[in-house]
Image (cartoon, rainbow, N blue to C red):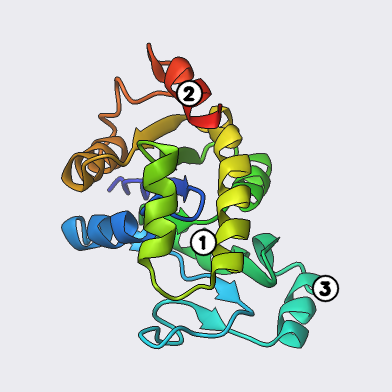
Amino acid sequence: MSVTAQRRGKLFVISAPSGTGKTSLVKALREATPAIGFSISHTTRTPRPNEIDGKDYHFVTPEQFRAMIAQNAFLEHAQVFDNYYGTSQSAVEQALTDGIDLILEIDWQGAKQVRERMPESIHIFILPPSRAALEQRLRGRGTDSDAVIARRLRDSVSELSRWEEFHYVVINDRFDDALADLQRITQGEGTGLERHRDGLKQFTQQLLA
C-alpha cells in the first residue's frame, strides 16, 4: 500500500509600512480563509487595550526576547521603533511540515531574513494609494501624539522604497479589492499582481516623490 507524501505548506510573508491598513487586511484575510494559519509573533511592546496575549502576540520582556535570540529560536527578528518583534522558528516549521499554509505579518527587515532562510517563501508588500491617505490613516488611529505620527510617517515613507524586494504588490485603495487581491495570491492566482507589472514603478515613483 502506497503512502501519499504530506504536502508541505506554503509560507506567505506580508509586509507594509504603518498606515497602509495591513493589520486590518490580514485580519480580514484570516476570517475569509480559515484554512490558512497565522504565525503569532513575539514582541516586547506593551499590549494595546484590545489585544490578548497568545492570540494577537506573545508579549515578553526584553530579557526574555534576548534569551530567545541567544537560543537561535527566531526565524526572524527585528527592532521596530522602540520594540522588538520575532517569529518562532519551530512554530513555523511545524505548521509547514503539517501541510498548513501560513501567514507571517512582519516588517521588511524580518521579511529579508525569511527570504534568506526560506527562499521558497512568497512575499507580498502592501502600498497605500497616496501619501495623503497614508498620513490620514496614521492620524485616524487616535492613539499617537503628533510627534509619534510624524516619526511614523517619515519611517513609513522610507519603508515604501522596499517594495521591489517582494514578489507581489497590493495597493490598498479600496479595502475589498485589496482583500480580494490577497486572496488571489494565497490561492496561487496572483497573475497581474507581480511587482514587475506595467505601471507599478511609475506609481511608486510618484508615491515616493
Say which amino acid is labelled 1.
Val
Left or right of 25 in this view: 69: right
- Report the Cα–Cα distance between label 2 and label 1: 37 Å
Residue 25's place in the image compared with 49, above or below, is above
**Amino acid tagged 2:** Gln
Q: Earlier in the sequence, mark 2 or mark 3?
A: 3
Foreground: 169 or 91?
169
Residue 80 sits in quarter: bottom right
Depth check, front residue: 167 or 19: 19
- Residue 28 left/right relative to 120: left
Q: Position of residue 116 (x, y in %)?
A: 68, 41
Camera-side mark, 2 or 1: 2
Left or right, 72 with respect to 171, comes to right
Disc 2 to disc 1: CB gap under 8 Å: no
- Secondary element under disc 2, as helix, strand or loop, is helix
The residues tagged by marks 2 and 3 sit, at their Cα atoms, a distance apart of: 42 Å
Residue 21: % across, % down: 36, 54
Residue bearing the label numbered 2:
206
Give the residue displayed 29% in from the left and 63% down from the top.
27
In the figure, is residue 95 to the left or right of 152? left
Tell me the tag on residue 92: 1
Q: Quadrant of residue 56?
A: bottom left
The answer to whether the residue labelled 2 contacts the one labelled 3, judged by CB atoms less than 8 Å apart, is no
Q: Nearer the viewer, mark 2 or mark 3?
A: 2
Q: Residue at x 61, y 66 (%)?
A: 147
Query: Label 3 sits on what residue type?
Result: Ala
